[in-house]
Image: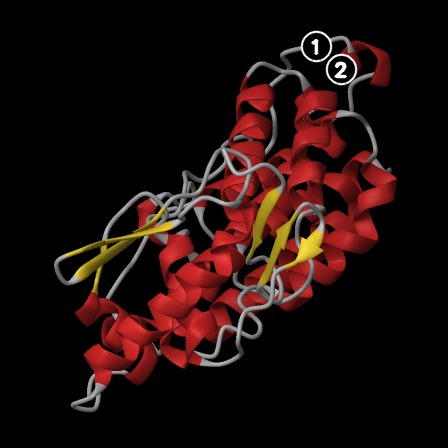
């Protein structure tokens, strides 16, 4: 293992070796490295790299240009004395060891947070989700130098960050920190008004904070947006939560902090987190079309929406 190597994509692209930044030329060279890192351990063809750099109409010199970028990257990443990029006929593969890529660490921490939530270990869930979020330094792939790559990957990464936020907030609610998360939830629901899970978490936090009227008003706000923007009523989960608030369902009450911290397995409301977002490659046109469809932001990518 090349000790001390770090590859960071959750913000501007950064490579470090032993804490020292390894320079990577701006523009297309960064885009090539980002594609290889996002496919670490998998071979990436020249055609895929060319599409990332130039879109659907690469110039005749595309293959030679990609080869030159890879050659320079291979030399630059050899600072630790080991080759990182291997070449196969028309294809390339980058080797990244465990813990070196921030995206992989983020996914592992988010997965650990989900496991802890299923086990009722809410303090662990909150800590793991918080650690995952701490890896973010800004807009992912902010300077990767490829619109195609940004269109293909940034929505997926942003969705995972939002899932981590929801996981951390849900754990905070189970730890009776409802008052502390209300402001954050209001802001998130305003930025993502079609995301029913956020509205449900906000309603629950308000209700547990003794603000029943505000919780019901939050439901009406969510319903209005969904009807106006999508022409549809809220999903079953949100409607059932409204009814439980109206009837003051005892199951919605906040549990005692000590009991939850000790590992209580009380049901979460709402309880189900979405699955891992699937990886998309070479689908820039399709993603553009999907992005333009009304209502796509209301569901989890990959069909994991628990409201549908």
Q: What's the distance in space between the residues labelled 1 and 2, CA to CA?
A: 5 Å
The quarter holding residue 217 reads bottom right
The quarter holding residue 219 reads bottom right
| Residue 48 visible in the picture | yes
Label 2 residue SS: helix
Q: Position of residue 252 (x, y in %)?
A: 69, 27
The quarter holding residue 150 reads bottom left
Q: Position of residue 266 (x, y in %)?
A: 64, 15
Which residue is located at x 71 percent, y 31 percent? 126
Q: Are marks 1 and 2 in contact (CB under 8 Å)?
A: yes
Label 1 residue SS: loop
Q: Which residue is mark 1?
A: 263
Q: Position of residue 43 (x, y in %)?
A: 23, 51
Q: Position of residue 31 (x, y in %)?
A: 42, 71
Q: Which residue is mark 2?
A: 260
For this rendering, which residue is in front, 304 or 307? 304
């Amino acid at each position: 293992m090349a000790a001390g190597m770090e590859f960071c994509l959750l913000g501007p692209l950064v490579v470090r070796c032993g804490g020292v930044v390894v320079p990577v030329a701006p523009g297309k060279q960064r885009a090539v490295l980002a594609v290889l890192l996002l496919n670490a351990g998998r071979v990436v063809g020249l055609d895929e790299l060319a599409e990332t750099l130039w879109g659907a109409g690469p110039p005749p010199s595309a293959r030679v240009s990609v080869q030159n970028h890879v050659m320079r990257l291979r030399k630059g990443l050899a600072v630790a004395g080991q080759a990182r990029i291997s070449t196969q006929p028309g294809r390339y593969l980058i080797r990244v060891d465990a813990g070196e890529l921030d995206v992989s660490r983020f996914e592992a921490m988010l997965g650990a947070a989900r496991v802890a939530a299923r086990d009722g270990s809410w303090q662990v869930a909150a800590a793991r989700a918080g650690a995952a979020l701490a890896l973010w330094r800004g807009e992912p792939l902010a300077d990767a130098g490829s619109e195609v790559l940004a269109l293909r990957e940034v929505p997926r990464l942003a969705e995972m960050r939002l899932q981590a936020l929801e996981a951390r907030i849900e754990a905070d609610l189970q730890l009776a920190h409802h008052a502390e998360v209300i402001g954050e939830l209001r802001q998130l629901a305003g930025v993502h008004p079609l995301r029913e899970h956020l509205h449900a978490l906000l309603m629950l936090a308000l209700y547990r904070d003794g603000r029943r009227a505000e919780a019901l008003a939050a439901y009406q706000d969510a319903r209005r947006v969904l009807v106006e923007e999508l022409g549809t009523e809220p999903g079953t989960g949100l409607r059932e939560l409204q009814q439980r608030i109206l009837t003051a369902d005892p199951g919605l009450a906040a549990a005692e902090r000590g009991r939850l911290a000790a590992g209580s397995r009380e049901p979460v409301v709402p309880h189900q987190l979405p699955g891992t977002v699937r990886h998309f490659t070479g689908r820039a046109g399709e993603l553009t079309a999907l992005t333009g469809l009304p209502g796509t932001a209301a569901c989890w990518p990959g069909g994991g929406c628990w409201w549908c």
